[in-house]
Amino acid sequence: MEVVIVLIILGIIGYLIYQSLPNTKFEKAQAHFIAKNYVEAINVLNGIFDKHNDAPAKFAECKLILGQGLKANSEKLKAFNEILELRKRINNTSSIAKFENIEAKTLFEIAKIQYEETKADIDKLNQNLKFIDNANKKGLETDFNTLRTKHFYQLSESYFKKAIEIEKSNKYPDAIRVYKKAIECSEKSSNSTTKHNAVARISICRLKLNESIDLQENSEVQKSDKEYQKDLFYRYSVYLLKNGDFQQAENIISTHLNFKSTDIEKLRDILKAEKANIALNQITQINQKIEQLYDNSLSTEELSKFYNSLDSIVSSLKTVDLDLSEKVLAIKPTLFNRLLTNYISIEQYGNAINLIYKYPKFWESPELLKNLGICCYGYTSKGLLSEKNYKIVISSWLTAVYSDNVILKSLEDTFWDDNYTFSLVESIGSNYSQHEEVPENVNYDEISESNISIGATQRELLQQFETIIHKQIKDHQLSIQVNDFYDKEREAIEKVVKILATDILFPTPHFAISNGLNNEIIKELDSDYEEYSNEEALEAGVPYIKNSTSSIVYQYFFANDIIDRIKSAIEAENSATIKKLNTNENKGWIEKFDNISTIVEDSLFNTIANKISEDDENEALIAVMEECIAFSSNNEKLKHQYSNYVASYCISKVNDDVIDNYKALTLMKGAYLRSPNNPRICKNFITLIRYNLMDMLNDRTKKTTDIYKILDWVKSNMSQTYKQNSSELSNARKEILQQLKEAGVDTSLFDDSPFGLIQPFGQSLNADGLKMKKVLTYLKDLGSIQETTNPLDRLRQLRQQLNLDDDLPF
Amino acid sequence: MKNPYTILGVSQDAEKAEIMKAQMLAMKYKKYSLQEIQIAAKQLLDPAKRLAADFMFPAKIKARRIQIIQSNLKYQDINVNALNEDAFESLK
């Protein structure tokens, strides 16, 4: 009994000790916390505040929850400040670390309350921002940042309102300063509305201060309040008008003040008056220049400046007085003539060419085209041709000289021709009587002493030009370029002249393309082809192609280009490209044109022949040739070229031991396939068959299966020529059997009967024997000669036997 | 190629006899080489070549003489200062 009592007492003491342990107490507090009995939890935690690491944080958390539950902000703030005070009681670093999480939450709660209480007060907002900046934000960084942004948003609004008030009291510099603060805060809070409005208001303040502003790239202003925009753009227009920038003012008014208002009308009236005054000044100046022009006191340079200024003057006058603008426009041709004459007389041919080229459709005027020709001649004779300009100069010269109308126009200024007439019969600018109208002294009659050849004049001009090109171009490279270009342009224009019988301007390709005349020429050539199926017309049109793909000329060019691409691929030994080009569509384009389809085979044959002449033992060429054969529908010549090339290649490489017999056999199979009746191919192919069979018999090859595959193919693809030449194989068989007999071997074992394998007397073939039997069987199958009944074949056979046809290469 | 008319010092409408006479004079004055004079004369005595020489005279393009431009516009006074800058004041 006593023992029991002692045990009970010990138990109670133990229990009491256990209950008084900090961990036990914390667990108790935790239980209160979970049960939301925060006051009881606080009481328990208060007892172990210094004894348990987690106690201060839990204590603070309980107080935070209780504080959050209070109604009045003042009570809340009091409770939260008490939490912050707890930090002083904590002397354990581990406890502090845990407490700081609750401290951050408490500070955030305080900051939130303070933000709500600022009521847009700028000072309070700034103070609370400082509070936030200094606060411990542990774990609540995002929340604090969001709260901070809210402050800036509120601040931007407050600053903007404040600035408005300052602006209203006409203190513009101060207002600008505060608007800038609003912009600063709006940028931190993405408050774009306030930002745009503040930017607009700053510009308005500046204008109120009569300061200049720049709205060139200010898109923010255009997003501001509509009323602000109206105010700003109006003030800006007034500012610009006051400062004489009428052009900019007009832009602003037409773009931003496009609404009805008497005040805007006033602006427009000012602009109108200003334009009229400017127009008056311009007319006065133009009249002064006209006077100078006729008293010869206007230099060529001043005349050029005057002429070049007319377009913009005409354009500005149109809005003021249409009649006046037309009067100014009307003086342009006279000024143009005067300027061109000046340029030519002082030999400024480059300026003259540029001037003519700027004149709309100058080529329609024979006079201008003639003057252009003169300038090009003069420019070249002065040695001024360069890489940059020679194309324009040469194409313009040729176009001018090849134009019959230009030469006919020249006759009008000729005064010694009273006794002469002129004939277009040899003209280089037309091929027969195609001119709709010719002068009285011009005809198409035979040339005589009194009937002068216009063609001779044109040729004389060309010859003179060629002489100056030859003399004046010292740079060798440029000389090559110029002469090459000249020849091509001349050749092209001559082709067109020869074909087209219409009375139109025949430009050279470069002239036509530069001046947008090429499609007209192509159209004429297309029509000629459609009417006469004349592919020469298409050929002539090719140099005139720029980027139009809808013409027949282009189709012709495209078909030709396919051949050119194949030829390039042959040059580059690129069989894959030829394979890619081998499509039905491409073949269709080629087939459409006889000129192209009939030369495909020859064209490819010649390109390959050139390639062979460079290197006649190039294996890469074999695949290229195979693709060419596949591309060309008419390909007998290509097949012959291919087969002979392959045969020569195999002969050379087998003899030099560069390739083995199997490889030669596979290559020769290709040759035989394409030229099965070519005796040379058949003979060499048969020889290679024999070599391969001997290789198999003597274990010199590992390609037995592949070789038999080829031989099986040959069995069912024996041509007449093959059969006539296959005795080599049957002879080889006979020779082997003879040798076997001489060696005492029973050759009946190799008979090609199903019973040959096992003989009646028990003799059988071992593996070598079976191999021998198979080779002998193939020699027999591939070498059997069939008698021909065709006398021509017999004759051929006889010739071959007499070695009259081809040599035996191996 | 120099202009044969310039070398021989004759006008564009010179007749055959005039050209031959000018050739003799040019040879006498020796302003140009004998070869140049001969080529120039040959060119002007051959109608087709002479036509080529004539080609090098710029074509005259007919154009009217420009008259002084008359305008009905009158100079207008502009008073920018009379504008009401606050017409669209946005802070009213």
Image (tube, coloured by chain):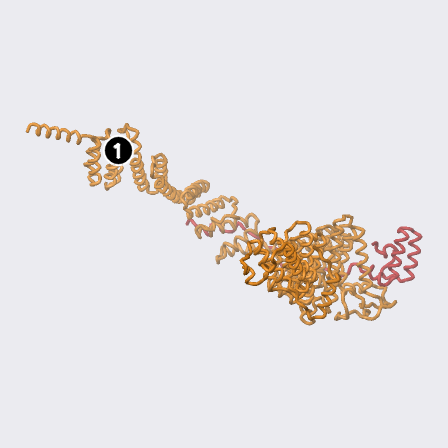
> In screen coordinates, is A500 left or right of A30?
right
> In screen coordinates, is A245 left or right of A32?
right
Give the labeled residue for mark 1.
A54
* Image chain in red: B
Question: At numbered mark 1, what does the secondary structure look like: helix, strand or loop?
Answer: loop
Q: Which residue is nearer to you in this view: A706 or A275?
A: A706
Q: Which residue is nearer to you in this view: A445 or A277?
A: A445
Q: Quadrant of residue A576?
A: bottom right
Name the residue at the bottom extreme: A531
Name the residue at the front extreme: A761
Chain letter, disc 1 residue: A
Amino acid beneath label 1:
Asp
Chain A color in figure: orange
Q: Position of residue A752 (x, y in %)?
A: 58, 62
Q: Quadrant of residue A787?
A: bottom right
Q: Position of residue A289 (x, y in %)?
A: 70, 54
Judge whether residue A287 can be spotted in this image.
no
Label 1: how many residues lie within 10 Å, few (<14), some (14-19) or many (20+)?
many
Rendered view: A69 above or below B76: above
Q: Position of residue A333 (x, y in %)?
A: 71, 60
Q: Which residue is nearer to you in this view: A207 or A503?
A: A503
Judge whether residue A683 can be spotted in this image.
yes
Rendered view: A594 above or below A661: below
Q: Position of residue B64 (x, y in %)?
A: 73, 62
